[in-house]
Image: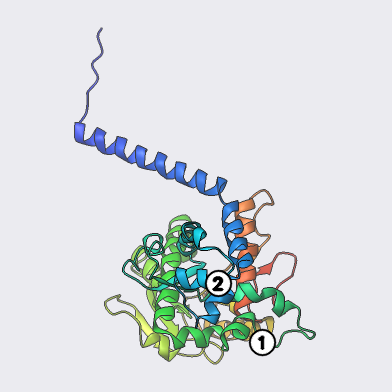
Amino acid sequence: MAQHHSAGDPHELQARHTSEADELLEAHHELWSHALGYIKSMALKCALDLHIPDTIQRCGGAATLREILAASDVPASSLPYLRRLMRTLTTLRVFMLSHGPSNDDPAAAADDDAAAVSVSYPVSPMFSMGDWMKQHHAPTVSLHEMVHGKGLWESVQGSDAYRAGFYDSMDADTRLVMHAVVSESPAVFHGLTSLVDVGGGRGTAAVAIASAFPHIKCTVMDLPHVVAEAPSGTGLCFLTGDMFQHIPPADALLLKWILHDWDDAKCIKIMQRCKEAISAKEGRGKVIIIDGVIGSKPNDDITCKETHVLWDLHMMAASNELSERSTSGEGSS
């Protein structure tokens, strides 16, 4: 008997083929990104060899390509190569463009000789890590403070642009993480009717929980200046407070990337406040902790391990108190 196969909706087939092609191209790009990853380090080394960060600082914190060229030993004939180097490093956000006609596109804007380039705020302390470590006594200020003259949180509050970028990046990362949490570990939230996201910022994590579990009343607690910028229309309750002083009772308390911001002594204080809050729930309370722990994944998970140790150096640069803890007991003390 002859078998007949439906050709299917041509629009559906085209959409499917387009999706598969997009996925293939994305995988192709990712493969080449990994294969060429070593060039990132070499490009950064080249910038250091040419003293580009120092040149930018001598120019008042921002410099055009021609100003960098004029202040360095690079001959004028190498301007096209310098332009390509800086295009790469601005795309990687090692440097950032302060202004220019194509500011929304770092790769394009770096092609413009008039576009001013400056050292990216979070990246610039890394250029001084060696000097910071060479101090005769244990550093009393963080690497970030040594370079910028103020601590990380002061920097966040002192610059509208930096604060916006900081919270936007945290929100984007939180949406990704919480999607995995609520879809892969729903049992964690079963039986809960209330939850407080301690230090929850603009409520991105709480929104994800409330969307997945509408019966849970979610409250976000943070410092007054953070709550003052909380978005409206989320359906969340925002509460000002200090987690070292008091945390309101709830069935569950969420500590997402909170404990790695503090040393052990301060973490103990936070956990004491958590204990008081869940004790008021007659034994039904729980504390949900989401944090990175070095060594928590198998040794063959190289990508995860590399991410953890790189994040730990990032934390070290930000503050003397910040550290990724590890399964071996290393970390904040």
Residue farthest toward the top in the current orientation of the protein: 1
- Quadrant of res 12: top left
**Residue 27 percent across, percent down from the top left:** 45, 43
Amino acid type at circle 2 is Val
Residue in front for this viewpoint, 198 or 31: 31
Q: Is residue 276 visible?
A: yes
* Residue under pointer 1: 141
Check the image and report above or below for 161 versus 242.
Answer: above
Helix, strand or loop at mark 1: loop
Which quadrant of the rendered structure holds the C terminus?
Answer: bottom right
**Residue 178 percent across, percent down from the top left:** 44, 63
Distance between mark 2 and mark 1 Cα atoms? 17 Å
Q: Residue at x 22, y 24 (%)?
A: 7
Residue farthest toward the right in the current orientation of the protein: 136
Q: Residue at x 55, y 92 (%)?
A: 245
Is label 2 or label 1 in front? 2
Residue in front for this viewpoint, 272 or 139: 139
Is 272 on the left or on the right of 249, as rendered?
right
- Quadrant of res 223: bottom left
Residue in front for this viewpoint, 199 or 184: 199
